[in-house]
Structures are given as structure tokens and as C-alpha cells.
Amino acid sequence: MSDVRTDWTRPEISTLFALSFDELLFRAQSVHRAHHAAGEVQLCTLLSIKTGGCPEDCGYCSQSSAHETGLKADKLMEVEAVLARAAEAKASGSRRFCMGAAWRNPKDRDLDAVVQMVEGVKAMGLETCMTLGMLAPHQAERLADAGLDYYNHNIDTSPENYGNVITTRTFADRLDTLEHVRAAGINVCCGGIVGMGETREDRVGFVHALATLPRHPESVPVNALVPVKGTVLGDMLADTPLAKIDDIEFVRTVAVARITMPKSMVRLSAGRESMSEATQALCFLAGANSIFTGDKLLTTGNRGDSADGAMFAKLGLRPMVAEEPMRVGA
């Protein structure tokens, strides 16, 4: 019988969160080694190809036009400029190149350039990932025809907490886009953000929503909120710093994601620039096996290649060798 379940219950997930820390990490690492090579971490690079001016009101996002963060809205980057950044990423050891645009949803006329970006990055031998907001079925099919490997569309938080974070689209809207991506045969990248002042029960609900999808996301990014002044959540955490998730609880979230979604790549994403090496080491022990490298994630800071290289050497980790991504089929 397969150990990949999509029928997890919230009480089961709550029980995992409540395990003693050593038991939880032991279970997570055991699951990890049953499905992934120990000590290997995939290196990914994320580039903002269209920054700012987004009409959504996501409470964490510096790119929302609803927030006064001082960020200037830019137009979609030229294809040649994106491909040059992809080549730099590959030379630095990245194996996946992720491209993000601050749109509610792309316009069909924008997809001509986006398709060229996908095709050009794939020609370099890199995995491709796009995050462009909500997709219509025909848009997902066009990206699939271009050979897009992954589409990122995060659920962000639990269904119950979602309305406290975003009001301009619903949790169901998120799930609709995931269905369109799946139907087109593109791998799904879907995770969320913790440390937004949510409760542990919200974190249980967040993992439950992902782990009970008809098929687990092939990639699950777990972000720690990076508070940005001028955003709703950034200002809230500045006033109530105790709302910030502590490091052990963050590691617990990574571990529970690994146990419930054993074959997924669990990506340690935003927030690493403020994490100690010890916290990151615990995340790798908990089953995280992918990170974003470079100095910047969309508009917020990141640790940088040299810091990551030094950490990998200290921990005895090695970058994952590229493999051809599996197509999920329509």
C-alpha cells in the first residue's frame, strides 16, 4: 500500500504538531530518506519579471497597489534580460529558475513574451516555474504547450484565516487555478506563509488543505513572513512583535509538511535572511530539500550565494543535480 495519503484529517495533523520535537524530527527525517536523497538540496532562483502595481490586497505583499511601501511599479521585463538572468543563475548552480509577475491574472497579450521566456530558459537546461496570478484554462494550456515545468500559486494560509489576509480573491479562486494547472499537465508548486499572526490551528488547516488535494503539489514552499513596512501585516507585526512565529514552531511546520506530503519537494523559501544557520539546519533535518539562492526574492532580501555556499560546506550538504521533471499528464 502506498504511503502517500490524501485523506489526512485535521486531528491527525494536530497530533503530529504536538509530538515532542525530537520525535517529530525523527519521523520527518525517516520519511524524507524513504523518498529523497539525504543531504541533497535543490538550488532555485526567483526573479521578478514584472514588479509592483498588483490590484490584489494581500496583507503581506509589498507589490500590492493597496499598500504604500515606496515600491515603484515596473513593466514586464524584456525577454533577453530575463534569459540573461537565467544564465547567471545557472552559472551560480541553480537548477530551477522561477519567474514571478505581480498580476491578478495575466492578459492573453502578455503570454507571448512569457512563452518566449519559458522556452528560452528551458533551452538552457533549467527547470522552469512561473507565478503569474490566477489562470484561465486556455492560459494554462498555452504555458503547458511552451513546456512550463511548474506553476506556483500559493494558498497562503488556512481556509479559515484566508479572509484575514486577502479580500480581493477567495480561497476557492486559488483552488480553481490549481485545477486548471493540473488539467493542463503542469506540475504544481503550492505552499504558503507562516508567521502572519495565525494560530497553530491555522497552520494545521494550511497543511491539511495541501495534503488533502487530489494530488499533492510536487513543490511545497514554506515561507516565513518578511514584514514590510507599509503592508498591513508588516505594520501589525511591528506593533505586536510577539505575533511572529518562533523558530521551533516554524521547523515543526516544515516537518509536518514533509510527513504528510512525503514525495513533494519542500522548499525553505522567504525569511531565510533572518534565520540562523542552526534554524536552517533544523529545517533541513525536518525534510526541507530546496531553497532559493541569490540576494533577492522578488522584492525582499535573501541570504546570497556566498552565505549559502558557506552554510552548505559547514553542514555537509550538496546541491542537487538536475533531473528531467516528470510531467503530470492531463
Image (spheres, grey):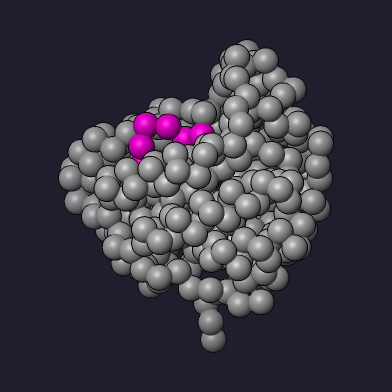
In this rendering, is residue 59 above or below 240? below
Is residue 57 visible in this depiction of the protein?
A: yes
Vertical relation: 148 (above or below) 192? below
Q: Is residue 328 above or below residue 313?
A: below
Instruction: Identify which residue is drawn at 57% across, 64% down.
Output: 146
Residue 215 in the image: state x and y as whole percent.
63, 70
Residue 115: image location, x then y, percent: 58, 55
Of 232 and 141, nearer the camera is: 141
Tell me if residue 290 is in the magenta stretch. Answer: yes
Q: Quick one: quadrant of the N terminus? A: bottom right
Toward the viewer: 11 or 104? Answer: 104
50 vs 321, left or right, is right
Residue 120 image-quadrant placement: bottom left
**Residue beneath the point at 73% across and 51% down:** 108
Residue appearing at x 53%, y 82% in the figure: 2
If the image is split into quadrants, where does the C terminus sit?
bottom right
Of residues 138 and 252, which is closer to you in this image? 138
Highlighted range, magenta: 289-298
In the displayed structure image, the side of residue 1 where residue 161 appears, left or right:
right
Q: Nearer the viewer, residue 311 or 320?
A: 320
Q: Looking at the rendering, which quadrant does residue 321 occupy? A: bottom left
Whole-percent x, y for residue 68 in the image: 67, 15
In the displayed image of the protein, which residue is found farthest to the bottom?
A: 1
Q: Position of residue 205 (x, y in %)?
A: 69, 51
Does the magenta portion include 265? no
Residue drawn at point x = 37 percent, y = 31 percent: 295
Is residue 214 rendered to the left or right of residue 171?
Answer: left
Horizontal placement of 300 versus 165: left or right? left
Image height of 8 relative to 192, above or below: below
